[in-house]
Image (cartoon, grey):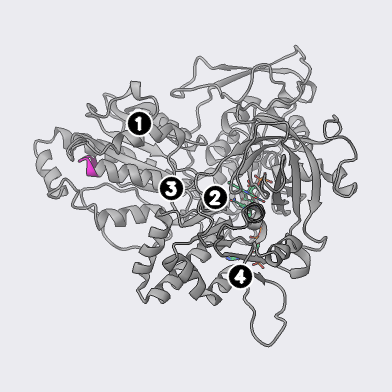
């Protein structure tokens, strides 16, 4: 029920890729409909808000980036509240709700949100609503949607508490002696867990004082799509359900395509990070033709740049969208005649969107083709709000209904299985729903910025002066309901096409690297904060990198080989590499180089395993890297627990890194004869001391 007078709350967001910002904007938008006024500010806009004097409820939406770090725009905020001299009642006047975004594929899930939450509690601030931990690994909306839904009642309650003369008493009942909320230890943890993982079947009561979102178990994504359902067809009961569909996202961009045909400029990525265009001087296919995945190595000539990297750093590759797909999208939007027209963007004067801004990543005078090629992530999975908006541009009733289902609460399972899991793109959706004709403005409003892709440096500049290597697998998306033909990842697909002439010329371009005909790649450096060789060469270390996860360790070993050559009297610690792949003969990446490092003593121990080869002898062979770690548990424990050595893990975050982590906990538990909780603490300490480092990606 809307309130008569608009009641204000402060809405702060800390965004890295724009997700937290978009969610905050969504909250702001919905606030209006619920009779509230959200004062929305980026955390970095410290001149626009003052927590020291804030008396209205505060809503915080914040993401986590990198290795658990705050987004850049939240750094100052986090630093500010962490000031050690602040008294414990510094924020005793504040009541707040926090929505933390993260990805559970990484060890430091929602770390920034958790840090802010913990610190605000230490400084006396109080929750008026249970903290939400939304997981990009399973779909942010599973937590975000119910969290927002419950927010309005919680704000209302917070206000009524404020005007309630018994408020102090209520607060005391909720607050322990040190200002620590009484519910915060157990009940809050339960509340947080409940909201974080919808799949938990938890019957614990939540604190009666702390409103919590009502979680819709039907959205857990654990159920399967009923047989017979496809992207365009639903079956009962969904086909007969009354649907709760999200609010229509407000339009805010007006687009004009102007016939002032400008010549397509040479590529200048719309990003300052893209510092260098460098030639590809070598390309090698590392896997055999019959391998499950195709692994490629590229060598870039960086001698003409200021790039200075260390093994362990990554590079950002700025890639365009697939040209065929861009053309198809232009055709599908009915804009074929205007592909070279200039895109002129303006904010709509009648927009209801709060704090609407034009996307900074669309340069002035971009042509339509340039916009779709270099600026927008046209492959991003359409969000439910986008589907909702498409409904209004669809004329066929059956198609309209299906789009409504896919964005509805009731159709969540279909959305997860038919849109999100197969990574469907907007083009694929438009091809499946032929009567849908959205305007270009909708795509600009709903599609995120095309982001560069990161790759670990797979070389050392000591070993290969002026060169930078990286390794990748071509990502393949198979056919599915809604995708008639298989396709490749945006960047890996583009790179593989770019270098195919080089591969045909036995790995090296036939021309001078400066020639305009030699393929060039736009790159920027993405330095790592900690994933580097130990500064003391005597420190022993273990590397765990199956598949392309071996990339940074090739850089480490090249570097170490050169250091050993140049410093024959220095003492170097032992080095272990745990590598794994499917078949020894098809995808044992860098086999010769690794064996050479063993021969010359750079690599003391090389432990490999093959997950799909039959064991050679009667004994079962280790399948995965963690099985090999178990076989060498005593050495692993000795290096980590007695010799202050380090362990590095690189590669797949979803399965491998989690399993390796579990194995480390087991090894530590066994070696120290402590229980699992104690072992977890020891492993967490190793992590804190930067003796256990991960560079993993989902
Ligand atoms: P996209 O079109 O962006 O599609 C990616 C989507 O495909 C993912 O969202 C996922 O849902 C799905 N997918 C399916 N299989 C895979 C798979 N095997 N890998 C990735 N996504 C998959 N990759 C390397 O190959 N080598 C590296 O050295 C490397 N280093 C990285 C370092 C860092 C710091 C980070 C953040 C990532 C690194 N990656 C590395 C991953 C890389 O940046 C890209 O995500 C990957 O190459 C896919 O890009 P794409 O544009 O081809 O795929
Ligand atoms: P991969 O597909 O992960 O496979 C490599 C080996 O790992 C295979 O033998 C596979 O076996 C095995 N494996 C599967 N599940 C496992 C598990 N739970 N534990 C241990 N091993 C397991 O290799 P890849 O294609 O090279 O992928 C590596 C991933 O890391 C990619 O997603 C890539 O983008 C990413 N990457 C990230 C970085 C970084 O963040 N710096 C660097 C390089 C690569 P089966 O298939 O037989 O089960």
Q: Position of residue 115 (x, y in %)?
A: 34, 45
Q: Which residue is mark 4?
A: 624
Q: Earlier in the sequence, mark 4 or mark 1?
A: 1
Q: Secondary structure at mark 4?
A: loop
Query: Of the residues tagged 4 and 2, which is closer to the observer?
Result: 2
Q: Residue furthest front?
A: 569
Q: Earlier in the sequence, mark 3 or mark 1?
A: 1
Q: Position of residue 679 (x, y in %)?
A: 38, 68
Q: Nearer the viewer, residue 190 or 201?
A: 190
- Residue 201, visible in the rendered structure: no
- Give the side of residue 154 with respect to residue 472, left or right: left
Q: Which residue is mark 1?
A: 11
Q: Which residue is mark 2?
A: 532
Place residue 1 in its image quadrant: top left
Q: Neighbour class for label 3 at 10 Å: few (<14), some, many (≥20)? A: many
Q: Earlier in the sequence, mark 2 or mark 3?
A: 3
660 shown above or below 131? below
Residue at image location 72% in from the left, 54% down from the top: 478
Q: Earlier in the sequence, mark 1 or mark 2?
A: 1
Is residue 125 located in the magenta-colored stretch of the structure? yes
Query: Of the residues tagged 4 and 1, which is closer to the observer?
Result: 4
Q: Which residue is mark 3?
A: 134
**CA gap, disc 4 and disc 1:** 46 Å
Q: Neighbour class for label 4 at 10 Å: few (<14), some, many (≥20)? A: many
Q: Nearer the viewer, residue 642 or 13?
A: 642
- Residue 154, visible in the rendered structure: yes
* Start-end of magenta stretch: 122-128
């Amino acid at each position: 029920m809307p309130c008569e007078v608009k009641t204000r709350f402060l809405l702060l967001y800390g965004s890295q890729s724009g997700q937290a910002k978009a969610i905050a904007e969504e909250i702001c938008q919905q606030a209006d409909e619920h009779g509230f006024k959200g004062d929305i500010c980026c955390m970095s806009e410290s001149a626009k808000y003052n927590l020291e004097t804030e008396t209205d409820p505060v809503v915080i939406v914040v993401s986590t980036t990198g290795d658990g770090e705050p987004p850049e725009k939240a750094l100052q905020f986090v630093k500010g509240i962490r000031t050690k001299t602040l008294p414990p009642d510094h924020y005793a006047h504040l009541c707040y709700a926090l929505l933390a975004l993260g990805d559970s594929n990484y060890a430091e899930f929602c770390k920034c949100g958790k840090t802010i939450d913990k610190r605000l509690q230490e400084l006396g601030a109080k929750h008026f609503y249970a903290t939400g931990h939304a997981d990009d690994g399973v779909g942010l909306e599973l937590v975000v949607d119910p969290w927002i839904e419950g927010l309005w009642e919680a704000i209302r309650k917070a206000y009524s508490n404020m005007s309630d003369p018994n408020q102090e008493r209520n607060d005391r009942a909720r607050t322990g002696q040190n200002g620590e909320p009484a519910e915060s230890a157990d009940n809050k943890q339960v509340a947080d867990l409940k909201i974080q993982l919808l799949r938990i079947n938890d019957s614990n009561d939540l604190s009666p004082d702390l409103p919590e979102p009502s979680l819709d178990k039907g959205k857990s994504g654990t159920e399967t799509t009923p047989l017979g359902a496809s992207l365009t067809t639903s079956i009962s009961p969904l086909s007969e359900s009354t649907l709760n569909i999200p609010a229509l996202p407000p339009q805010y961009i007006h687009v004009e395509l102007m016939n002032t045909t400008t010549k397509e400029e040479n590529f200048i990525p719309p990003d300052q990070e893209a510092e260098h265009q460098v030639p590809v001087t070598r390309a090698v296919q590392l896997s055999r033709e019959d391998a499950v995945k195709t692994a490629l190595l590229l060598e870039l000539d960086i001698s003409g740049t200021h790039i200075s990297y260390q093994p362990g750093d990554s590079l950002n590759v700025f890639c365009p969208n697939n040209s065929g797909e861009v053309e198809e999208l232009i055709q599908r939007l009915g804009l074929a005649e205007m592909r070279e027209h200039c895109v002129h963007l303006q904010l709509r004067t009648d927009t209801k969107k709060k704090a609407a801004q034009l996307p900074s990543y669309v340069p002035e005078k971009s042509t339509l083709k340039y916009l779709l090629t270099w600026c927008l992530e046209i492959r991003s999975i359409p969000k439910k709000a986008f589907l909702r908006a498409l409904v209004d541009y669809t004329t066929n009733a059956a198609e309209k209904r299906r789009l409504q289902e896919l964005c509805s609460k009731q159709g969540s399972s279909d959305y997860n299985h038919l849109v999100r899991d197969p990574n469907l793109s907007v083009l694929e959706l438009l091809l499946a729903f032929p009567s849908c004709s959205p305007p270009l403005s909708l795509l600009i409003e709903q599609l995120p910025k095309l982001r560069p892709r990161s790759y670990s440096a797979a070389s050392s500049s000591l070993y290969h002066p002026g060169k930078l290597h990286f390794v990748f697998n071509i990502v393949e998306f198979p056919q599915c309901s809604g995708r008639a033909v298989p396709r490749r990842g945006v960047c890996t697909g583009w790179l593989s096409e770019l270098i195919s002439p080089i591969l045909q010329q036995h790995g090296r371009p036939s021309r001078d690297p400066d020639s305009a005909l030699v393929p060039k790649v736009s790159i920027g450096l993405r330095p790592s904060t900690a994933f580097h060789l130990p500064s003391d060469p005597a420190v022993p270390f273990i590397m765990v990198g199956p598949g392309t996860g071996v990339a940074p360790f090739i850089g480490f070993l090249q570097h170490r080989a050169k250091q050993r050559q140049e410093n024959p009297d220095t003492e170097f610690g032992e080095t272990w590499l745990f590598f794994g792949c499917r078949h020894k003969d098809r995808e044992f990446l860098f086999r010769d180089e690794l064996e050479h490092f063993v021969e010359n003593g750079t690599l003391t121990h090389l432990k490999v395993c093959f997950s799909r080869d039959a064991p050679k002898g009667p004994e079962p062979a280790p399948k995965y890297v963690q099985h090999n770690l178990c076989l060498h548990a005593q050495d692993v424990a000795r290096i980590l627990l007695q010799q202050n050595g380090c362990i590095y893990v690189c590669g797949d975050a979803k399965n491998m890194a989690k399993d390796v982590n579990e194995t480390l906990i087991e090894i530590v538990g066994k070696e120290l004869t402590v229980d699992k909780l104690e072992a977890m603490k020891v492993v967490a300490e190793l992590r804190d001391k930067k003796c256990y480092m991960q560079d993993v990606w989902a």
